Amino acid sequence: MTVLRVVLGDQLSARLAIVAEAEKGTDVILIAEVMAEASYVRHHVKKIAFLFSAMRHYAEALRQAGHNVRYVTLDDEANSQSLDGEILRAVEELRPSRVMVTEPGEWRLRERFEALRLALPVPLDILPDTRFLCAHAEFGDWVEGRRELRMEYFYREMRRRHDILMEPGGKPAGGRWNFDADNRKPPKAGLSSPRRLSFRKDAITLEVLDLVRRRFPDGYGRLEPFHFAVTRRQALRELDHFIDQILPGFGDHQDAMVAGEPFLRHSLLAAYINAGLLYPLEVCQKAEAAFRAGAAPLNAAEGFIRQILGWREYVRGVYWRFMPEYLERNTLEATEPLPWFYWSGETRMACLREALAHTFDHAYSHHIQRLMITGNFALIAGIAPKAVHEWYLAVYADAYEWVEAPNTLGMALYADGGLLGSKPYAASGNYINKMSNFCAGCAYDPAVSVGEGACPFNALYWDFMARHRDRFSGNARMPYVYANLDRMGAEKQVALREQAAAHLDAMRAGRL
């Protein structure tokens, strides 16, 4: 009997049971481009093009391997334009004995599939997503009995479990678990990105680019140039290029930001890992092998591996553990609407303008710009968490709710009340000036907090700390902040609060 096996656009892996166990010639693999998924937030046009092209290439590879593939294009006249609609249509036409899907990465789709079970005339099985390195039950076991969750301890457990960067006797390579302190150097003169790969656009990709131009004429972002890998083979080339050419310099300056340099030494691999073209363990093992061979320093290899083996698995665990309530969290009661300049990039603040331009052009901005520029501003300006969440989900090619929501609501905005991070990642203009060269071309001066040319990050930072003093003054990582605030005296504190109010008025009026 035929089994209908559904592959989602971020599950393009031949190793998943949904494909690996399919009976060639009998079972049918369904892959569908649907408007419901392409438009539920205002996705970057590069993100849509990357996924549609990768999906079409993946379907062709399955056909060549002997599988029966039912591929529904966005322009198919019979397309219902929803995943559940396409599953129902396939069931009506093919009469399978059952339907199988791999667990989706987003809660809303999981709920849709659970509801679909009631509408289908045949059983629907939801299989675990085995691409991840920590199953839901394993994360639940780790959480059980802990008073607080901290990624560092989870990361150590994952290192032991998967034997990554470990030495005999259970000791970490180099005698330390974490080399983050070595990875915070400000940018040096001339710091730039090594040459990056650009892949030839075949007929499939050219057809997808044309489709996206036609169907998303008002979509966010710049569609071309389009450099993405869209097959596993190309993604493996991207991985090898990073390991050989870029990883050796990744560690020292991973927190640095440079005008005109969107990538620096960052990997650009997240979009491929999250879509299934690369596997997280193989990426970690290649980085470890480079360190063992003396081709990459330990601080670079460990810092990179921590992002995947530690942080990526940790935020997924948090997402599924605390959803759906997690999306509604707003501990700091932030209510400001998202400023239009997050979409337009039109602001006098050079740091935000730069990070937003990278986002618009590449569907990418590296993690420090996301956390300490766009996220930091949203935090101290009191932007509503859900609005910020939907923006991050839309604009980055690597963004799916399971990874994006905890990073945004927890790490960037502290909306979850410290579940994910032990303190808010708020910073003034001084941090941005230290870790970037953005301020040199800015209308505002990072050394000025009040008056003409005052950097908005300065007054907004101190206003944020004053507004939330009752919550944060007892935080073990923040006593120096409030000691500095108290040393300013009442008159300066009033001036800072008034300056912050003026910045917020300018933000609301589109003049910031």
Image: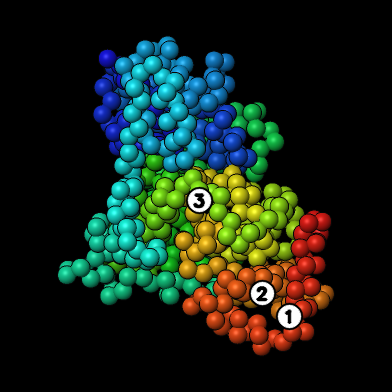
- Compared with 288, 455 (above or below) is below
Instruction: Specify the amino acid type for callout 2.
Output: Ala
Which residue sits at x=45%, y=71%? 183
Q: Do the residues labelled 1 and 2 touch (CB within 8 Å)?
A: yes
Instruction: Specify the amino acid type for callout 3.
Output: Tyr
- Say which residue label 1 marks: 493
Circle 3 packing at 10 Å, graded few (<14), some (14-19), many (20+), is: some
The image quarter containing residue 87 is: top left
Query: Cα distance, mark 2 to mark 3?
Result: 26 Å
Image coordinates for residue 387, horizontal then vertical, percent: 64, 49
The image quarter containing residue 500 is: bottom right
Query: Cα distance, mark 1 to mark 3?
Result: 34 Å
Image coordinates for residue 408, horizontal then vertical, percent: 54, 55
Label 2 or label 3, whichever comes before in sequence order: 3
- Say which residue label 2 marks: 466
Which residue sits at x=54%, y=19%? 79
Is residue 435 or residue 122 the one in the foreground?
A: 122
**Relative to 239, 260 lies left or right:** right
Q: Is residue 494 visible?
A: yes
Which residue sits at x=28%, y=62%? 157
In the rendered image, the residue lying farthest to the left is: 169
**Relative to 54, 219 lies left or right:** right
**Relative to 302, 385 lies left or right:** right
- Say which residue label 3 marks: 326
